Amino acid sequence: MRRFTAPFAGLLFALVLVATAFAQGRLLIDDPLDQIRQPSLIQQAAAPLIERGAIVVVYVKARGNDADFIQLLKRDGFVRSDGKARVELIAIYVAIADNYSALRFGERWRDQLDGQYQQILREYLSQPLSSPNLSQDIGAALAAVDASVNRLTLFDTSWARWIVYPLGAFLIVILVLVVVRRVTAPAHSRPGYPFGNAAFPQATAVQRSQDAALDQLAQRFMAAVERVCANAGTVQPDSTQKLLFQDVRLALLRLRRGRAGVWNSAYSPAEELNRLEQQLKDLERSLSAPSLTFSVYQPVGQAASPAPLTVAESHVQAFRQALQAAAQQFWRLDWSLADAAVQSSEFDTSALFQRLRALLFETTLTDESAPAAIAEARAIEAEATAAAQRWMQRLLRPAPIPQSSSVSPSYTSDRDHWDDDRRSVAIWSWGASTASASSDSGWGDLGGGGVDSGGSSDSGGGGGGE
């Protein structure tokens, strides 16, 4: 058995290196206006470029110009302050109200796109303001970019399959031989290994069962939160609901972090799951009980008959919709951070949670207080969205290379200071992340430019980043 281990490990490591070197493409869509109704069209059009290693970026704004385009690329780490851009970059920018579009690209695509990008913009993105289907237009532009790249490819990684595929087949053969040897060999317990080989599949099955149970409990929790939102503002909650809500949330996050490798409980995962399920049942049972409507009472000396608290129905509906959106966005943030507990330790959501819990269980709506409550719910949603975006950008940012103590602390700090804008970001990734920004090997001059509604190009065509 041992004689197979070293060659197998070495070949597997070589395969990983080869696959990583040629699988660095990804797609990022920044669409705060939600104008991209069919992102699948853009994903499909970008897929061939991504397979070639391209970093495809799409920005859709209400207003803007090429300067704003460059600033967005700098902010997201695709263009440096000195104007150098990722060589794999292919970026499309659309400012709808200004009828402006632009296409920028890195040095890898310069020979293919320098003479083509203006024609692509005029043909597919010259009139974004009047476009009936912006998703289709952007997808067609990316398809045209891919066609231009296919005509002349100076750096084509398609030959990599002739290395990866035979090497992969060879590794599969070796793996089959190892498995056959292990299956046919007699089972002997080794010192320090009290369990036989049969225990591992059983442990894996138990883990899969626990993961499925956790996901199901998380879905039930969100359904319960939606029921709380549907009654918030005018219905007095049970005094225990707030405590159960907090306990269930913490138990879910604790199990989620445990699945990610950080376990902070005196109970075993199975025991923690049982406790969580009982707490969730108690929460669901309390939500099924009849609720009391908030009431106001007349002053002393008058008839002491309670009168239901009145508030405009439009205020109630707007508040509950905003509260539900805030609760969903906050939970998505909580769930994502818990899935990578070691990396997300600097993200503190406790203050945001306290504000959300106050809206869920401590808010009494009146015609005077409703606007402030609605604004608070929307502010929580926006802050949770911004935090989720910073978290996603942190995951996308290449890991820093360890530096000596003489390097400035700004390059060695683990904390990322990203712009707190409120954008809607959707990301699809293939393969590994890009190379570290500390090396110039992946950076070069930025090409491309834009066209306005009149079809004239700007001064950035084929030039640098500014």
Image: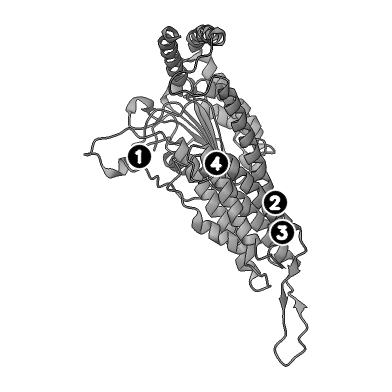
For numbered disc 4, what is the local secondary structure? Answer: loop
For numbered disc 2, what is the local secondary structure? Answer: helix
> Which is more toward the observer, 259 or 278?
278
The label on residue 81 is 1
> Which is more toward the observer, 345 or 281?
281
Q: Position of residue 287 (x, y in %)?
A: 72, 58
- Where residue 172 sits, quadrant-wise, is top right
Q: Earlier in the sequence, mark 2 or mark 4?
A: 4
For numbered disc 1, what is the local secondary structure? Answer: loop
Nearest-to-viewer mark from 2 and 1? 2
- Where residue 210 sits, quadrant-wise, is top right
Q: Amino acid at mark 1?
A: Ser
Residue identifier under label 4: 268
Q: Is residue 155 above or below residue 50?
A: above
Label 4: few (<14), some (14–19) or many (≥20) C-alpha neighbours in 10 Å: few
Nearest-to-viewer mark from 3 and 1? 3
Would residue 66 appear left or right of 217 to someone viewing this image? left
Q: Position of residue 272 (x, y in %)?
A: 58, 45
Residue identifier under label 2: 281
